[in-house]
Amino acid sequence: MNYQLSDFDFALDERLIAQHPAATRSGSRLLDGSGDVAQDRRFTDLPNLLNDRDLLVFNDTKVIHARLLGQKPSGGQVEIMVERVLPASGGQVACEVIAHFKASRKPAIGTSLFMAGYSPETPDQGFTAELLGRWPDDNGALFRFRFNGDAYTLMEQWGHVPLPPYITHSDSAEDAQRYQTVFAQNPGAVAAPTAALHFDDTILAQLQAKGVALANVTLHVGAGTFAPVKAKRIEDHHMHSEWYQVPASTMEAIARCRARGGRVVAVGTTTVRTLESWARSGLAEAETDIFITPGFAFQVVDALITNFHLPKSTLLMLVAAFTGYARMRTLYDHAIAQSYRFFSYGDAMWLTRQPPSADHDPARKP
């Protein structure tokens, strides 16, 4: 069945877009979409949906303060949104980054921008960012910069939390804490793996007490996760590239889970993309631009915990591939009717994988 972009559209009242997290991490709702009939639960019910044979896999990426504000030497305002930090070599600090760049008029290559209040008169405030050119080539949509110090340190000190575009308030101390998972450890993401935001120490302790095994992967989520799909036919869309890593310990945990008849449960779409990229490529560490759409043959993931995603988004297409298009539409209709909270700070959904044969919407013509 050939899907069009319009097949993944839906109307959403702005009041359902969560602007702030729930009062507590695990205080959100959980829509159980694993059965024939959707069930309304609380996220604290999650341990009851798992058993001691299951393996829960998290994305342990850490969100960096990637949004940086500054000025051109002429005084014009600029914004740098770091997409990734380039690895250092020879014992040097990592000072070069690839970024999205906003300016009323792009300055010449070699220009040093004054970031976070830096000026020659106040050198202890902020830092400089030298524009090195476009990336990956002269026609690239991104830009390469050299900071005058360690990029991670400068972003942590002077940067802002890169909140998604649909969150309308400026970042706050609450966002610095809550737009980050409790187990984040590998810095590099510019968007949080939002399904994992619901987990707190109490839920994790309950899962471990029940005998549920835990493992982790890393995928540094890029700003491209919010990029709209523009192609009318979804097969014409090309995904952005992100770096991932699957530790040997996680591969071993998956093998043990399979041996005991358990389910591999992915926490979030980024974990799904990581595990299925590894299964397809055989590479434990690589760049991936995998695009998961209805009809995709899953090799690793059996169940999924995920938030509610944007209309016409690649993440919504992944959910449709996992649970079936018709079921996805039914679950989203239910969530809207029951006023679930949507997107990054919103509620969660529990799904089990459906066979590709279930991916049929009788109300829709092929």
Image (cartoon, grey):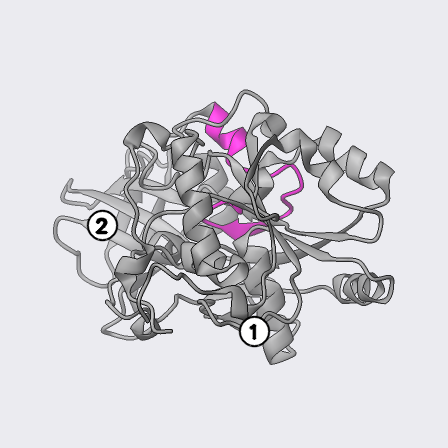
Closer to viewer: mark 2 or mark 1: 1
Residue 235: percent from left, percent from top: 34, 74
Q: Are marks 2 and 1 in contact (CB under 8 Å)?
A: no
Q: Residue at x 40, y 61 (%)?
A: 361
- Label 2 crowd bin: few (<14), some (14–19), many (20+), radius 10 Å: few
From where the camera sits, is residue 343 visible? no
Residue under circle 1?
297
- Identify the residue at image location x=55%, y=29%: 28
Asked if the stretch drawn in magenta spans residue 282, the answer is no
Residue 278: x percent and y percent? 62, 72
Q: Amino acid at mark 2?
A: Lys
Task: Tell me the magenta residue range.
Answer: 174-193
* Helix, strand or loop status at disc 2: strand
The quarter of the picture where the N terminus appears is: bottom left
Q: In the image, what residue type sits under mark 1?
A: Ala
Does the stretch in magenta take in 180? yes
Disc number for residue 95 = none
Tell me where residue 262 appears, x and y as whole percent.
80, 58
Q: Left or right? Give the position of 30 relative to 86.
A: right
Residue extending farthest top:
23
Q: Secondary structure under badge 1?
A: loop
For label 2, the residue is 102
Residue drawn 49% across and 60% down? 324
Give the CA separation, mark 2 to mark 1: 39 Å
Q: Is residue 327 left or right of residue 133?
A: right
Residue visible at 26% across and 59% down? 6
Q: Residue 246 versus residue 12: which sits nearer the camera? A: 12
**Residue 355 higher or lower than 170, as above or below:** below
Quadrant for the C terminus in the image = bottom left
